[in-house]
């Protein structure tokens, strides 16, 4: 639920003498709200773009973005280059897929949610151009954004959008999709250009999605929530053969970098694409005037479920490419295109029960259990109700026919009851007074809180299970093999009683947990002297899953500091705040030693997160977890071994790394910069101090040359890290170009 921003600030007074007051400055309440919104949006983007597992509805996400933009417009000092309003997608992180730098940035789209907003955007566009353009209207595909690079007509790379500048290399998987040509048709009237970036969406056809979920359900496997998730999950498989078995398709709707593509309109780009064999949507039209645009929107709003794929709106573009160039773009979106979002879909279904879930921080959340109903492309049977106050506000009773709203997202919303259909048999939901898993009395953390929590953080089975699973998630330590099922099994078997021994687990421990074992073979059972071989317990041995978990636990010990912070399940400390804390302080010891004021002064942290951190470290068993992990070898500092914490050779400097370095991963280079007090930026500007260029560097190298920023190779980068800018003085081309 999105609530209005609380404020303890008085409105600015107007001086009696009529002088113009100085620009208003954001006070503490607005600073806190800004930091909170940035953290929530960062986490939501990471979940959506990075992990194909949305945690917010589209409506909730859009509302937060609107509020964030309003705050930054009112108080520009809050806006930073890293703000979600200034970038595309989620910050790039290390995954199992190699990073790919897009030759030309992949932008996102600004959204409008009403006809009035659309009219205003079109009027501004006409005014900026001085004439009414031809409008290119096309349906907005609800899929996964992909960038195809063709070199001399052959598919060279396929990549996800990522943060707009760096995506994930999915080339082997993309080659299995029938709609994506491995080679462009050279017999077309105009030959394919030497370089072509074709952008579009990979999607799951609706009929095929239904069949896939039916197949998964028969096999007792988890079904996909919607076609978008099915497409993303299928395309990001480690084994391309799994992708090949999924009936994925693609539609191209944009062009990036190119050489030799001589057309003057976007619609003619589509014609060229079609001639070369690239898939193009059958659902687009060039029209003149606002009324024609609105007719297109209305038509596909009525027929959205008759299409090959799911849509969540209509994209309106200026067709003329020269006009597009004149209008330009912001840091995250073009000014010549807009996405009109259809209102959420609503259906009726029966609310059969209201139950509660206990989360990793003890928060108790009621949720509705409903008759399964299909809405917005997926079948829904459960929906969160947030807290007891929200249940009362909505006025829903168990047994009610309710209105369910969903807008192509994973998380649906119960809007309220259909009161006219009540029979009198409905019953009121009563929030439990005691934890359903450990029996401890529930209470709010603070008197003013609407949420109630289980205070038994130390040993509540639900909280332990959720914390272990969260620690292993891709947002935290990324320990494959330790999910919900694995966490529950470890606790049930008594192998773990909290997180502290997680990194001390051995093969002897895991062989006692059924999900990590298999039946022993005859040879394993008999051994050399007709006795069970070592490692056999009750006729079972460690399975491949168990062996892999041990290896993954060992690898996780080397994860950067920010991931360790997230894994500790400190309230309010998500990836965004954790990155900021790790960048400023560099070590767990420094964070523990910092005052609340020092923590709050960290960009993107603020007073609320600072207070939560201080409170967390005051609990003795919390500190024991950190100490146990450290003793087991978990990385607790981002600095190189033997280098003092205060060795800040890059203090105050902004460094951009582009291309591939032999001695650094992308994430490793970033960590090396921030550990020395620098800022690892994702784009080159006049404020950039150094640009490090590796193999395969793209547009950032050209941008550095254009702006006259110092360019370093890998050797120069190492010198910069070790000695700072002073170490580069008098060096030759090998250090500074």
Image: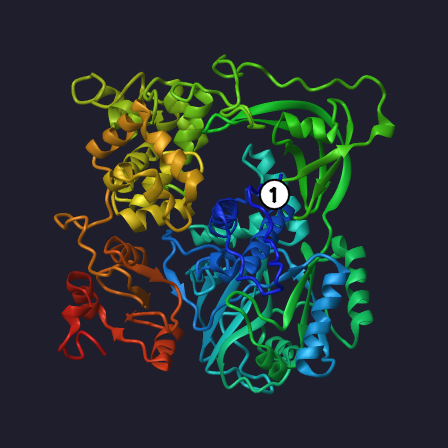
Which residue appears at 63% of the width and 28% of the height? 367
Q: Nearer the viewer, residue 5 or 653?
A: 5
Q: Name the element at disc 1.
A: loop
Q: How many marks?
A: 1
Q: Is residue 577 above or below residue 708?
A: above
Give left or right: position of 633 versus 261. Answer: left
Q: Residue furthest right?
A: 420
Residue 675 can be seen, yes or no: yes
Give left or right: position of 141 versus 299. Answer: left
Q: Tell me the quarter of the image containing the N terminus.
A: top right
Q: Position of residue 112 (x, y in %)?
A: 68, 60
Q: Tell me the quarter of the image containing the C terminus.
A: bottom left
Q: Residue furthest front?
A: 17
Which residue appears at 60% of the width and 78% of the height? 327
Q: Position of residue 429 (x, y in %)?
A: 69, 20
Tell me, what colour scheme is on the image?
rainbow
Q: Position of residue 470 (x, y in %)?
A: 42, 35
Residue 137 can be seen, yes or no: no
Q: Position of residue 363 (x, y in %)?
A: 51, 27
Q: Which residue corresponds to mark 1?
A: 410
Q: Nearer the viewer, residue 727 or 149?
A: 727
Which residue appears at 67% of the width and 67% of the height? 281
Give left or right: position of 482 versus 382. Answer: left
Q: Please rate how many residues cluster around mark 1, counting C-alpha atoms within 10 Å: few if below 14, some from 14 to 19, many from 20.
A: many
Q: Quadrant of residue 425?
A: top right
Which residue appears at 20% of the width and 68% of the height? 725
Q: Nearer the viewer, residue 668 or 611?
A: 611
Q: Nearer the viewer, residue 312 or 648?
A: 648
């Amino acid at each position: 639920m999105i609530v209005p921003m609380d404020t303890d600030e008085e409105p600015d007074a107007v001086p009696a003498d009529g002088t113009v007051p100085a620009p208003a400055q954001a006070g503490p309440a607005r600073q806190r709200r800004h930091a909170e919104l940035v953290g929530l949006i960062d986490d939501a983007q990471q979940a959506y773009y990075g992990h194909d597992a949305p945690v917010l509805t589209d409506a909730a996400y859009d509302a937060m973005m609107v509020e964030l933009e309003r705050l930054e417009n009112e108080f520009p000092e809050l806006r930073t280059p890293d703000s979600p309003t200034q970038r595309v997608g989620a910050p790039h992180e290390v995954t199992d897929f190699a990073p790919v730098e897009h030759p030309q940035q992949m932008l996102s789209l600004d959204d409008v949610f009403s006809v009035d907003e659309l009219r205003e955007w079109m009027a501004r566009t006409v005014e900026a151009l001085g004439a009414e353009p031809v409008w290119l209207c096309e349906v907005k595909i609800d899929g996964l954004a992909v960038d195809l690079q063709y070199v001399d007509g052959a598919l060279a790379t396929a990549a996800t959008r990522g943060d707009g500048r760096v995506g994930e290399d999915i080339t082997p998987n993309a080659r299995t999709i029938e709609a994506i040509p491995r080679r462009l048709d050279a017999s077309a009237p105009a030959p394919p250009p030497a370089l072509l970036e074709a952008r579009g969406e990979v999607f799951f056809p609706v009929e095929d999605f239904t069949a896939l979920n039916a197949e998964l359900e028969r096999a007792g496997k988890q079904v996909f929530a919607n076609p978008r998730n099915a497409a993303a999950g299928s395309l990001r498989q480690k084994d391309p053969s799994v992708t090949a078995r999924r009936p994925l398709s693609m539609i191209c709707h944009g062009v990036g970098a190119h050489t030799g593509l001589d057309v003057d309109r976007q619609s003619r780009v589509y014609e060229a694409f079609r001639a070369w064999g690239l898939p193009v949507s059958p659902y687009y039209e060039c029209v003149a005037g606002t009324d024609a645009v609105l007719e297109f929107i209305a038509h596909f709003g009525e027929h959205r479920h008759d299409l090959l794929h799911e849509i969540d709106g209509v994209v309106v573009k200026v067709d003329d490419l020269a006009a597009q160039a004149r209008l330009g773009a912001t840091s995250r979106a073009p000014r010549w295109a807009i996405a009109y979002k259809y209102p959420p879909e609503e259906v009726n279904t029966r609310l059969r029960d209201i139950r509660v879930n206990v989360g990793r921080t003890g928060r108790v959340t009621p949720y509705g259990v409903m008759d399964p109903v299909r809405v917005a492309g997926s079948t829904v049977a459960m929906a969160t109700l947030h807290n007891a106050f929200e249940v009362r506000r909505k006025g829903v009773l168990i047994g009610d026919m309710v209105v369910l709203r969903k807008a192509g997202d994973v998380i649906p919303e119960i809007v309220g009851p259909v009161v006219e259909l009540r029979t009198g048999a409905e019953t009121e939901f009563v929030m439990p007074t005691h934890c359903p898993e450990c029996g401890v009395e529930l209470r709010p953390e603070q008197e003013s809180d609407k949420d109630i929590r289980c205070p038994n953080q130390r040993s509540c089975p639900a909280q332990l299970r959720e914390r272990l699973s969260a620690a292993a998630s891709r947002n935290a330590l990324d320990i494959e093999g330790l999910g919900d099922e694995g966490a529950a099994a470890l606790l049930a078997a008594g192998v773990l009683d909290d997180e502290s021994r997680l990194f001390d687990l051995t093969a002897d421990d895991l062989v006692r947990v059924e999900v990590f074992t298999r039946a022993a073979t005859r040879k394993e059972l008999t051994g050399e002297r007709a006795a069970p071989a070592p490692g056999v317990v009750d006729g079972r041995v460690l399975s491949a899953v168990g062996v892999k978990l041990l290896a993954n636990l060992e690898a996780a010990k080397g994860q950067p500091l920010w991931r360790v912070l997230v894994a500790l399940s400190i309230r309010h400390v998500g990836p965004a705040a954790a990155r900021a804390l790790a960048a400023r302080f560099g070590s767990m010891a420094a964070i523990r030693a910092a005052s609340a004021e020092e923590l709050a002064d960290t960009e993107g942290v603020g007073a609320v997160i600072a207070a939560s951190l201080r409170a967390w470290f005051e609990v003795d068993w919390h500190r024991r977890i950190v100490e146990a992990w450290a003793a087991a070898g978990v990385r607790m500092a981002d600095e190189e071994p033997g280098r003092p914490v205060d060795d800040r050779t890059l203090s105050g400097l902004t460094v951009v790394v582009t291309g591939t370095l032999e001695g650094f991963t992308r994430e490793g280079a970033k960590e090396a910069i921030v550990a020395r007090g620098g800022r690892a930026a994702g784009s080159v500007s006049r404020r950039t101090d150094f640009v490090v260029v590796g193999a395969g560097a793209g547009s950032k190298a050209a941008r550095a040359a254009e702006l006259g920023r110092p360019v370093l190779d890998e050797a120069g980068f190492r010198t910069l890290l070790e000695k700072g800018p002073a170490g580069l003085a008098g060096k030759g081309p090998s250090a500074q170009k």
